[in-house]
């Protein structure tokens, strides 16, 4: 097993509605999707988004697109239109989620390292 | 079934695919990619979606000051560039550039058509999204969705209330022969769905097709965000020529299945990865994406790359539309003051920390009343706070930022003043400070029953 940033196996985009942020996390390859599913859990996301996500976190799964959608309530500093943040929409949360780390098996690690990705 | 429009045009269902371009995704979007679509896209429709949550509330304030205003500033430039091509190729235009004044926007469009001698190109406005009076009349019983409390609990003056209209009034305008339709608040994807409903004569309760059509509209309503915009991450996700991004267009089949693509020779990319990012971006519960026309179920959605820069969307279903319209409510909620200053060189972080202490103490001494104060260290953790990765070494420079919420303008200004006086009275060696003040127009949501919303179509003439 080796540890990598989530960024090495997935990409992400964040959206907003009121005070709720949603973050789509998409595995680059179908083989990586089980890693995302097992390790990007609402519990880990809550810990990772400490100080930001103040409400419930839910997760929706889209296996056919090897993607998950994380919905973080009360995560936009009171709402897009009244926030004091420089990023009121939380668009940069897509970059924050990709700083999570994941453990991958040797086959995936070899695949990633062949593509020039470095383990932590 | 054959219906006849007022001009005697046959309204038989179309059997060929319809091509719908996305000309804008927000009020200030780039103009020439839309003109390029009009010129080279062989489009049946060009749709400019121009209203973010708050845009219409700001437009409402502008209209209060000047009744002739309250619609999109760039309408003139956009239409002067694109309408000659639309005339040439028979492309019809649908846009939410009407904002708080769709009739004013429609008159402006009719004026341009007259001036450029493009007529006949009938122009219609869709009105009826403004439900401010209804919301004020029922403020004790209507609930704020974000808090569950009645509208009377909102802390400030309610200045606007706009219901998200669906596609139907736009379809009516098209049925009656409009070449250009200007609207206020309409659900973004419904602007696109209207073109499909008009062309394919879909019934307003044909949930399956409406669901597919709405999903197709959803793919392109944010414009270039599905054709290469906001995607690039060097070394990971490469996008060529962001400065010349092509805006996307749809080719929709009569059954509602659709392909997303962009013009040959433009920058950007349309692939499965970006379409997936965009698909998820607007949606929370994928089985229940609520729009005024239909509830879309994306559970079994498929995205396939079927050609270069071409993605097919399928597998979407629809469910009966909701009984209520969502309404965006604009509320004046005080002021935000900001002040920023940069420290550089060895020890910059220590100087910035000292400056923070000084400002906090000064705010007390001068009795500045703030409801909330936020202090950011730009370069360290300004976007993600304690969740940020720790820096490997001390930064060479750091920008200190204060942002505070105040009930009145005076206190918001004073916060910036206390940052300004750091030059000369705070730690040494800084940049010049900058300060900003703005009024907060907060947006909340509520639901109103369908009967409370009565959209209408108005045809206008140009002012001669």
Image (cartoon, rainbow, N blue to C red):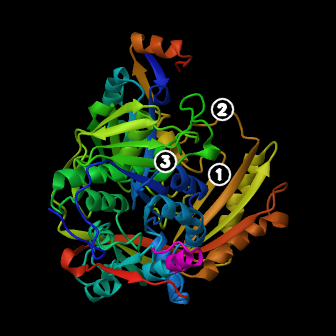
Q: Is residue B248 above or below residue B184?
A: above
- Magenta residues? B108-120
10 Å neighbourhood of mark 3: few (<14), some, or many (≥20)? many
Query: Which type of secondary structure does the marked residue at label 3 adopt?
Result: helix
For marks 2 and 3 on the same chain, the one whose residue lies earlier in the sequence? 3
The N terminus of chain B: image quadrant: bottom left
Compute the Cα span from label 3 to label 1: 30 Å
- Chain assignment, label 2: B
Whether residue B273 is visible, yes or no, is yes
Whether residue A47 is visible, yes or no, is no
- Circle 1 is placed at which residue position? B377
Q: Is residue A7 above or below residue B416?
A: above
Residue B92 % position (x, y) = 42, 63
For marks 3 and 1 on the same chain, the one whose residue lies earlier in the sequence? 3
Compute the Cα span from label 2 to label 3: 33 Å
Residue at screen point 54% across, 29% down: B236
Give residue B225's mark: 3
Residue at screen point 34% across, 38% down: B312
């Amino acid at each position: 097993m080796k540890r990598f940033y989530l960024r090495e196996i997935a990409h992400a985009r964040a959206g907003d509605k009121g005070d709720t942020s949603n973050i789509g996390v998409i595995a680059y390859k179908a083989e990586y999707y089980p890693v995302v599913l097992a390790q990007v859990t609402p519990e880990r996301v809550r810990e990772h988004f400490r100080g930001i996500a103040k409400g419930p976190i839910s997760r929706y799964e889209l296996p056919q697109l090897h993607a998950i959608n994380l919905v973080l309530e009360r995560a936009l500093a009171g709402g897009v239109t009244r926030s004091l943040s420089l990023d009121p929409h939380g668009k940069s949360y897509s970059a924050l989620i990709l700083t999570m780390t994941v453990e991958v098996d040797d086959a995936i690690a070899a695949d990633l390292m062949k593509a020039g990705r470095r383990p932590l | 079934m054959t219906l006849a429009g007022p001009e005697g045009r046959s309204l038989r269902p179309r059997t060929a695919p319809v091509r719908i371009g996305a000309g804008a995704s927000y009020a200030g979007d780039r103009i020439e990619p839309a003109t390029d679509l009009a010129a080279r896209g062989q489009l049946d429709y060009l749709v400019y979606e121009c209203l973010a949550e708050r845009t219409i509330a700001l437009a409402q304030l502008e209209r209060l000051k000047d009744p002739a205003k309250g619609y999109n500033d760039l309408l003139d430039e956009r239409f002067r560039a694109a309408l000659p091509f639309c005339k040439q190729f028979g492309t019809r235009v649908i846009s939410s550039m009407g904002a708080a004044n769709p009739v004013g926007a429609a008159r402006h469009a009719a004026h341009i058509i007259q001036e450029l001698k493009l007529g006949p190109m009938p122009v219609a406005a869709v009105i009826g999204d403004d439900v401010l009076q209804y919301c004020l009349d029922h403020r004790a019983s209507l609930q704020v969705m974000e808090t569950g409390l009645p509208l009377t609990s909102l802390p400030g003056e309610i200045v606007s209330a706009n219901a998200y209209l669906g596609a139907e009034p736009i379809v009516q305008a098209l049925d009656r022969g409009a070449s250009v339709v200007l609207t206020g608040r309409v659900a973004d994807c419904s602007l696109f769905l209207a073109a499909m409903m008009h062309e394919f004569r879909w019934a307003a309760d044909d949930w399956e097709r409406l669901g597919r059509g709405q999903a197709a509209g959803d793919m392109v309503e944010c414009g270039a965000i599905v054709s290469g915009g906001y995607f690039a991450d060097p070394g990971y996700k490469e996008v060529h020529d962001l400065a010349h991004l092509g805006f996307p267009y749809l080719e929709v089949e009569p059954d509602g299945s659709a392909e997303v693509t962009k013009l040959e020779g433009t920058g950007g990319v349309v692939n499965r990865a970006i379409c997936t990012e965009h698909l998820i971006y607007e949606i929370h519960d994928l089985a229940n994406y609520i729009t005024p026309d239909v509830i879309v179920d994306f559970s079994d959605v498929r995205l396939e790359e079927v050609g270069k820069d071409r993605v097919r969307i399928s597998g979407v279903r629809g469910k009966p539309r909701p009984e209520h319209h969502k309404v965006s409510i604009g509320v004046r909620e005080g002021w935000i003051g900001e002040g920023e200053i940069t420290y550089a060189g060895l020890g910059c972080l220590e100087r910035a920390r000292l400056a923070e202490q000084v400002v906090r103490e000064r705010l007390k001494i001068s009795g500045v009343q703030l409801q909330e104060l936020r202090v950011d260290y730009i370069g360290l953790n300004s976007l993600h706070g304690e969740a940020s990765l720790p820096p490997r070494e001390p930064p060479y420079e750091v920008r200190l930022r204060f942002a505070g919420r105040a009930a009145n303008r005076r206190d918001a200004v004073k916060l910036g003043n206390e940052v300004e006086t750091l030059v000369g009275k705070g730690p040494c060696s800084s940049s010049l400070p900058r300060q900003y003040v703005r009024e907060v127009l907060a947006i909340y949501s509520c639901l109103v029953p369908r009967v409370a919303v009565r959209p209408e179509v108005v045809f206008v003439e140009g002012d001669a």
